[in-house]
Image (tube, rainbow, N blue to C red):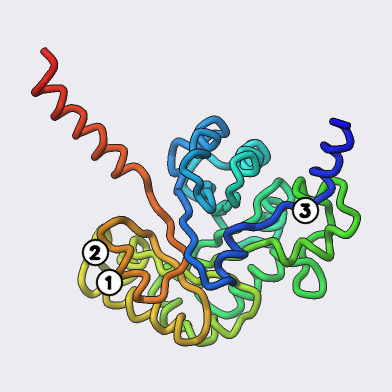
């Protein structure tokens, strides 16, 4: 009986909860495991019930040898494993999917051709040119190639001012699920390095998000308790939350309490 139950679980494709919610018009809250992600850390996020876990492969420690275990931990807690890769390369995109990611985040997508490249690497025929192989997410599933395109989620980062200038043509590309406008690199491309909150930068972010929404596309944002309502009003439905400020705030409150009450 136990073996039969295990086989049944394996042979059913894993659902992309985050993607389902987005296309139901619901918000998605994704926790960013920046800088300290590991399978054990991810499992400990389970009680928080995040819709997705953002795994950092551009600036962090997520790379092919450990993606399988990171994404497996996401499967255990019922969260969508979303991996940011470090280059817009079709081989990197589909290898990351083969290793278990259900979402791919591609940085510095600046024009229509680069957006099309994301789709070609992230989708099987007839939507793209993803290399034919069975992902860890498809083990034991005979019709995996038919189902995978529906479950994979593609997110592009429009983080250079040239991408904003090319926005209309980028939005013409189908099968990209989320278009995000991160302010850090955008500020740098505007000649304002380290000034992500500069009014000129935020003005471009707000206007671009509203343009994306007006075209009927989904946008997202790095959100916190101070800006989440503003970003929602801009059209964001995919929210990436960095937990580190809340960890710092919680520990600072503990220290204040301890100084007053513990000798």
Q: Which mark is residue 189?
A: none
Q: Secondary structure at mark 3?
A: loop
Q: Which mark is residue 13?
A: 3
Q: Could you say where residue 226 lies in the image, as x and y percent from the top left?
A: 25, 59
Cα–Cα gap, marks 1 and 2? 7 Å
Residue 91 figure quarter = bottom right
Q: Secondary structure at mark 2?
A: loop
Residue 204 figure quarter = bottom left
Cα–Cα gap, marks 2 and 3? 41 Å
Q: Could you say where residue 176 lies in the image, as x and y percent from the top left?
A: 60, 72
- Residue at x-position 11% and y-position 12%: 263
- Residue at x-position 49% and y-position 39%: 47
Q: Residues within 10 Å of mark 2 (few under 14, many from 20)?
A: few
Q: Residues within 10 Å of mark 1 (few under 14, many from 20)?
A: many
**Quick check: 165 left or right of 69?**
left
Of circles 2 and 3, the one toward us is 3
Instruction: Provide the residue designation for mark 2.
Output: 197
Q: Could you say where residue 190 lies in the image, as x and y percent from the top left?
A: 30, 72
Residue extending furthest left? Answer: 260
């Amino acid at each position: 009986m136990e073996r039969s139950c295990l086989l049944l679980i394996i042979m059913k494709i894993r659902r992309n909860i985050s993607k389902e919610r987005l296309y139901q018009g619901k918000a998605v809250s994704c926790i960013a495991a920046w800088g300290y992600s590991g399978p054990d850390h991810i499992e400990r996020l389970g009680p928080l019930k995040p819709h997705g876990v953002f795994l950092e492969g551009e600036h962090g420690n997520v790379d092919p040898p450990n993606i399988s275990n990171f994404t497996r931990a996401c499967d255990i807690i019922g969260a969508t494993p979303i991996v940011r890769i470090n280059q817009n390369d079709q081989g990197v995109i589909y290898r990351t999917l083969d290793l278990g990611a259900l979402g791919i985040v591609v940085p510095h997508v600046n024009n229509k051709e680069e957006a099309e490249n994301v789709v070609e690497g992230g989708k099987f025929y007839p939507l793209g040119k993803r290399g034919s192989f069975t992902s860890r997410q498809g083990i034991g599933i005979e019709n995996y190639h038919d189902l995978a395109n529906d479950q994979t989620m593609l997110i592009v980062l429009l983080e250079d001012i040239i991408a904003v200038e090319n926005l209309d043509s980028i939005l013409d590309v189908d099968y990209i699920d989320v278009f995000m406008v991160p302010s850090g690199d955008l500020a740098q491309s505007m000649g304002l390095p380290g000034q992500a909150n500069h009014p000129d930068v935020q003005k471009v972010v707000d206007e671009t998000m509203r343009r994306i929404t007006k075209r009927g596309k989904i946008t997202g944002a790095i959100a916190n308790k101070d800006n989440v309502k503003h970003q929602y009003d801009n059209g964001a439905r995919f929210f990436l939350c960095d937990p580190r400020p809340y960890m710092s705030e919680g520990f600072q409150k503990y220290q204040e309490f301890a100084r007053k009450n513990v000798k």
